[in-house]
Image (spheres, rainbow, N blue to C red):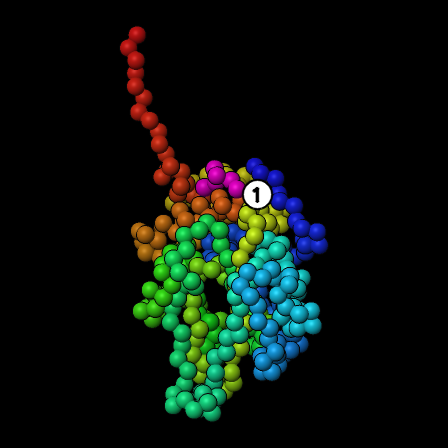
Amino acid sequence: MKPRRKLAKGAAQDHRLTTVEMARFAARGYLEFPAVIPPQIGEAYIEEVRSRTLPNVDAGTPLSRAYPAESALHAFVTHPRIVGIIQSLVGPEPLVDHHFPHIAYSPATMARRGANRPQDSQHWHQDSTIDTRAAFDIQLMWYPHEVTAHMGGTRFLPGSHLRIVSEAAIGRYQNIVGQRHVVCPAGTVLVLHHGVWHGGGANRADRDRHMFKVRLNPTVRQERLWNTADMPGDMNRQRPIFYETEPRANDDLHAILCEPQPWFEADTGRLEFVNRARFWRYLTGDDAFDADYWLSRLENQAQRRVETAV
């Protein structure tokens, strides 16, 4: 068992993710934090968007140097809860890949802008091109105001982050069973693994919808960066599978990592359990870990015994 990585001086230890939260991120590819950012920061951000005072940030800029101290975006990325989330997933000094102030315009705004029809929804996509790394980036999606069902909040597909595709090759899909649409209170932050399939929804409400997205790259090995105080001591114990006399607890590590999604096929959907177990090995540095024996049976290379005559 490798020792826990020490945090950088000043890191928000009390706000890091728990092992249960990390397992859910590993299994689902996202975490959602409702109303975590105060409304006044969101209001300041929207005003900066309207006044066109959001800063340009060169790709590869350290996050700590990306935003002016007096800006709403600085208040966002230095919020203690956000610092803890970032620390847990990509480490203490990530790089800004890019950011973008997404705006889904209302039909009235589109008409004022001279469009003859409402804004379309965005196609399904996985950000960037084919990406086979074990390392991963995260995308923080911040919703500075309430998002209602009519506002077309971001749709995303839980559990899709380890199903590697080529960016917009999935754009031909329409609706996928198990997809989610963001409906949330002001100040909600959605944290996505960079591989999660997603797309912006069409806004049919009477006001514009704002969302700020920033993608962050790690600069350290993403191994046990979270608060591991709740890491189970018997994490590698294999339990009965398929037939169990007692139901598992909701926070059981293996149960979380082997939780199916509605879009999983009966056969190839099981490959996602294999991928999750490999992902958890990457996150923990424990190459012996397995969840419900999915990797163990594949790695079994037992050799035939040859009896030697005496």
- Residue topped by disc 1: 232
Q: Can residue 253 be seen by looking at this rendering?
A: yes
- At 40% from the left edge and 38% from the top edge, which residue is drawn? 296
Q: Can residue 191 be seen by looking at this rendering?
A: no
Residue 34: x and y in percent read 58, 68
Q: Which residues are magenta?
A: 285-290
Q: Nearer the viewer, residue 292 or 13?
A: 13
| Total marks placed | 1
Considering the numbered disc 1 on the image, is that residue within a helix, a strand or a loop? Answer: loop
- At 38% from the left edge and 71% from the top edge, which residue is drawn? 123
| Image quarter in which the C terminus is found | top left
Quadrant assignment, res 3 = top right
Quadrant assignment, res 38 = bottom right
Q: Residue furthest front?
A: 58
Q: Is residue 198 left or right of residue 33?
A: left
- At 67% from the left edge and 50% from the top edge, which residue is drawn? 8
Q: Is residue 173 left or right of residue 195?
A: left
